[in-house]
Image: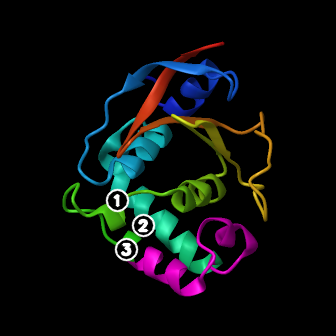
Amino acid sequence: MSSNFCEDITKAFKSPGDVPTKVQSILGDGNCGFRALSFCLFGSEEYHAFVRSTIADYLQKHKGEAWCGIFIPDLADQERHIEDMTHPAKDASEVEKWAENYDLAAAAKVFNVNVLVWSGLGCSLYTPSMDDSLANEQDRNLPSLPIKYSPGHFEVVLDVCSI
């Protein structure tokens, strides 16, 4: 594997209209969203706690901003979520510690990347420029982190095909 996995995976990715055809299995221990981000950024799941704490710190500094309200409108709820994000999940039963859309949007901002998440609803895009709307475009000058979400679990997209 290349030392710059993020750059390599971006080269394989073409557009949100693509369909995942190959995924990297990620440990399902309640930290899989952060493990998937870690794998995309560093080529390894092992930095998931660093990714989580970096996102939590970013959320703490930016709570109350317009983009935060898209995901969690109430400031007290934002603060509770940030507190839950402070420490990794001990196991998959700690649902309140799972990565959410709010965390994926923060990841896009703090790591200056596009985060693309395929699910049964299609492909969601989170970008560093997201402000007060989910209507945004992928910045082709930035790396894109392709992730697949199946109910209750995140994996990394390794390959896609155009539809």
Q: Position of residue 13 (x, y in %)?
A: 62, 23
Q: Which residue is mark 1?
A: 49
Are the residues tagged 1 and 3 within 8 Å (C-beta)? Answer: no
Task: Count neighbours of disc 2 (C-alpha within 10 A) and say few if under 14, some if 14 to 19, many if 20 or more.
Answer: some
- From this viewpoint, is residue 129 visible? yes
- Residue 5: within the magenta? no
Residue 112 has which mark? none
Magenta stretch: give its range. Answer: 63-83
Task: Count neighbours of disc 3 (C-alpha within 10 A) and say few if under 14, some if 14 to 19, many if 20 or more.
Answer: some
Q: Amino acid at mark 2?
A: Ser
For the stretch drawn in magenta, the main secondary structure is helix
Q: Secondary structure at mark 1?
A: helix
Looking at the image, which residue is at 59% across and 19% down?
12
> Between disc 1 and disc 3, whose residue precedes?
1
Q: Secondary structure at mark 3?
A: helix
Task: Measure the C-alpha gap from mark 3 to mark 2.
Answer: 11 Å
Looking at the image, which residue is at 44% across and 40% down?
42
Question: Where does the N terminus fall, quadrant-wise?
Answer: top left
Q: Position of residue 142 (x, y in %)?
A: 71, 39
Q: Which residue is mark 2?
A: 53
Q: Nearer the viewer, residue 158 or 49?
A: 158
Relative to 152, say whether 61 is above or below.
below
Q: Which residue is mark 3?
A: 84
Are the residues tagged 2 and 1 within 8 Å (C-beta)? Answer: yes
Relative to 83, say whether 88 is above or below.
above
Q: Amino acid at mark 3?
A: Asp
Task: Measure the C-alpha gap from mark 1 to mark 3.
Answer: 13 Å
